[in-house]
């Protein structure tokens, strides 16, 4: 196993609740009120739709607001990884990742472990550079039992709700989270910050038309079949945990364009034709990124004083 490279669940597609559109020469995020399932192939006019997208839409009347899923791991924190992440606005590269207690920050001579006071109390990540960032991996269908679809989000509502549901379902099922038949659900709410207009976040529940007790019974039956076949769920969780801890940052350089476009589209300084292969684009060095963020932090501190 290559040291310094996080080994993450194989991804065969993406789940989003919005898209990126081009306006006045800029690629900007446009929110939606339904799910979209895509492949990992991006063309000039956006991400290619996955065949499951149309299949699930036919099974639902109206908009796609529920997706039947299972999970790879029994440990909730392996299925959903949520951190405070500070990204460089030009490259989308993570430069600091923390959990509210400690963080890993890219500095001139490598990675440094530092205290993490969370975004509100951190001068380094002020000005919106640092935000919660969650990645949820789910299984859809039975075509690839180890190939997952990833949902990325910086929404407090989605991260908080998904984390709670995962831990609750794991507890009530006796640690059979990986066997439970569940579904992702899209929910709407309004707040004063949204000026009373609807905002949407992702929730998790038992599949429609079923009760929690029935889902637990089904999970136990699946767990027994897997054990009889020699399926070792505990070993899979251990392997995943070891893979995640093998690197300082989970997102690879191949994820940079997707992260930049999805969360920093209005500020991303890369090429406007983000659907093309940007492997030839220069990526600033860690020292340059550190310098830019340090300058911004110093400016903010000076203004506050």
Image (spheres, helix red, strand yellow):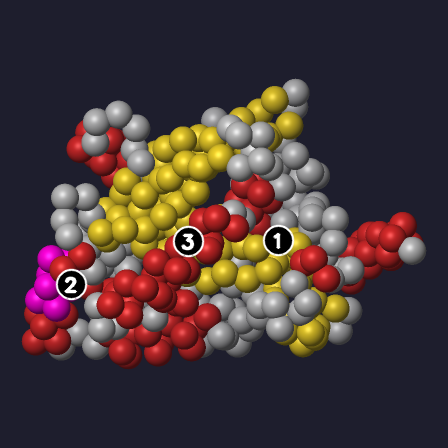
Q: Is residue 276 magenta?
A: no
Q: Residues within 10 Å of mark 2 (few under 14, many from 20)?
A: many
Q: Which residues are magenta?
A: 214-221
Of tags 1 and 3, the one toward the viewer is 3
Q: CA distance from mark 2 to mark 1?
A: 35 Å
Image quarter for residue 100?
Answer: bottom right
Q: Residues within 10 Å of mark 1 (few under 14, many from 20)?
A: many
Residue at image mark 1: 131
Identify which residue is drawn at 37% across, 33% down: 34
Question: Along the line of sight, which residue is nearer the eye, 213 or 181?
Answer: 213
Residue 131 place in picture, x, y as percent: 62, 53
| Eye-nearest disc, 2 or 1 | 2
> In this figure, which residue is indicated by the disc labeled 3?
161
- For the point 28% across and 67% down, the residue is 170
Q: Where is residue 104 shown, x and y percent of the image?
A: 64, 70
Q: Are marks 2 and 1 in contact (CB under 8 Å)?
A: no
Q: Quadrant of residue 293?
A: bottom right
- Quarter of the N terminus within the rendering: bottom left
């Amino acid at each position: 196993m290559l040291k310094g490279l996080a080994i993450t669940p194989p991804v065969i597609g993406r789940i989003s609740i919005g898209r990126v559109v081009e306006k006045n020469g800029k690629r900007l995020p446009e929110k939606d009120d339904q799910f979209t399932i895509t492949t990992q192939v991006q063309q000039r006019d956006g991400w290619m739709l996955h065949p499951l997208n149309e299949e699930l839409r036919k099974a639902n009347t109206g908009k796609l607001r529920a997706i039947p899923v299972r999970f790879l791991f029994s440990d909730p924190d392996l299925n959903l990884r949520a951190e405070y992440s500070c990204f460089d606005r030009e490259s989308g590269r993570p430069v600091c990742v923390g959990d509210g207690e400690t963080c890993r920050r890219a500095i001139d001579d490598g990675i440094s472990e530092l205290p993490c006071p969370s975004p509100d109390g951190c001068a380094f990540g002020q000005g919106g550079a640092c935000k919660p960032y969650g990645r949820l991996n789910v299984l859809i269908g039975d075509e690839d039992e180890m190939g997952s679809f990833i949902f990325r989000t910086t929404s407090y509502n989605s991260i908080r709700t998904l984390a709670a549901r995962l831990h609750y379902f794991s507890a009530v099922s006796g640690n059979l989270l990986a066997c439970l038949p569940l579904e992702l659900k899209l929910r709407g709410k309004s707040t004063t910050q949204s000026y009373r207009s609807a905002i949407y976040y992702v929730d998790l529940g038992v599949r429609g038309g079923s009760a929690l007790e029935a889902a637990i019974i089904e999970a136990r039956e699946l767990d027994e079949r897997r054990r009889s076949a020699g399926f070792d769920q505990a070993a899979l969780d251990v392997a995943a945990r070891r893979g995640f801890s093998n690197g300082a940052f989970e997102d690879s350089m191949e994820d940079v364009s997707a992260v930049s476009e999805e969360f920093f589209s209005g500020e991303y300084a890369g090429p406007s034709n983000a659907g093309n292969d940007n492997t030839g684009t220069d990526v600033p060095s860690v020292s340059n990124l550190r310098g830019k963020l340090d300058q911004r932090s110093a400016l903010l501190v000076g203004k506050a004083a």
